[in-house]
Image (cartoon, rainbow, N blue to C red):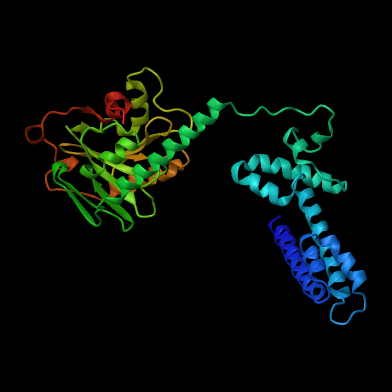
Amino acid sequence: MLDSVIKLGGYYLICMILLLWIVILTWRESKGLAIACFFFWPATAIALIQNWGVKGSDIRIPFALMLVFGWLAYSKAQDIQHQATVLTPEYIAYVRQADPKEADRLESMMMAAQARGEDVPIEEAMYSEGPGAYESSTPTYVEAPSPESVAEAAEDAARAKALAAQLKAAADVLQPQSGKIVLPSANVSIDLPGQYRFLPVQQTGVLASLHKLNPMPGELGWITHTKVDMATKQAWFVRVAFEPGYLAPGNVAALATDVTRLNSTGQPSFSTGDMGPTWNAQREAATWSQRMLWGQHTVKLLAHGALVFSMHSPLSEPEELGIRATRLLASKVTVDTGFDLASYTPETHGAPRGELAAFIAGDRKL
């Protein structure tokens, strides 16, 4: 469409140049007729006859050229008018920006009509339900959105824009840490892998509020990835928390069974597609996934409590990402001397707060 408009403008420009040429030639014989030709172009026919063969005033060449380009301009204008009333690739591309599904439907209609050597009027296409439906004698009426729905959509867009601005402002002031992260309150340190960064809990308050996250007991901070944009609602990150109190591993071989038995709701703790808790003896850590409820988690047991890694991510992220990320970070934990799980003694670290299975099943909803 734009290409056609440019061509039309070019034809009109050439016609104006030719008309000025005619006016200049006619001026030499009759100033009045030249002025008439400029303001009323059919008068050029009079100048053509009157100055036919007159040297220096003959307008046959510019007159003939003006007829040719005038016809081209007229044809192009008709073509533009036609394109404005029927489905074209340009119109479908414009629709696709707002509604890809509707654009696909219109494109199917256009291709079906082109196969028959026909055009699809835009007005009829908007009232049809599918390819060829515009041929029906009773087109389906598509109800226009109500003013209330339009206003509601505008409010939603404004809220989304405001949220995006708030997220960006909160992310811009973050000061992530890399390398070895020391967490004195938990008596551990974490050797972060190369692309991971730590955000102390003092920096995450605004973002937590914008993500509508409830505070985690004993939360120490978030671990993020350098490829994740923290200024978006789609950002994923791992929340790190320390919960004091020794958790006895219990019957780790039957951990999943024990969790189901101890679940405080009386219902199975894990649904189809979830991953029940598994125990890694070497790392002294349990990993589980309840994606639709609380996400993926790995808890590393210590003599004086538990270090919890909990994944926060949009549902579009694969479950495996959360499992791998929390396991990886738990494996990078170094425990201070005397605080590893094997060092537990009631005299030094206090009485147990319970068993790991009970902790997973119902003591704490992450």
Which quadrant would the N terminus be assigned to in this image? bottom right
Q: Observer-nearest residue: 40 or 16?
A: 40
Which quadrant would the C terminus be assigned to in this image? top left
Q: Answer with the quarter of the image where residue 35 lies.
A: bottom right
- For the point 85% across and 28% down, which residue is it? 137
Q: Observer-nearest residue: 363 or 159?
A: 159
**Would residue 248 appear left or right of 163 to someone viewing this image?**
left
| Residue found at the very far bottom of the displayed protein | 55
Q: Is residue 11 above or below residue 338?
A: below
Q: Is residue 327 above or below residue 126?
A: below
x, y percentage for residue 339?
14, 43
x, y percentage for residue 344?
14, 37
| Residue found at the very far top of the displayed protein | 266
Q: Is residue 232 above or below residue 293?
A: below
| Residue found at the very far left of the displayed protein | 347
Numbered marks: total: 0
x, y percentage for residue 112?
81, 44
Q: Observer-nearest residue: 51 or 135?
A: 51
**Would residue 236 appear left or right of 121 to someone viewing this image?**
left
**Would residue 148 appear left or right of 287 to someone viewing this image?**
right
- For the point 76% across and 44% down, which residue is it? 85
Q: Answer with the quarter of the image where residue 245 lies.
A: top left
**Would residue 251 appear left or right of 218 to someone viewing this image?**
right
x, y percentage for residue 194?
31, 58
Q: Observer-nearest residue: 314 or 186?
A: 314
- For the point 38% across and 39% down, which residue is it? 163
Q: Is residue 21 visible?
A: yes
Q: Is residue 71 visible?
A: no
Q: Is residue 54 above or below residue 50?
A: below
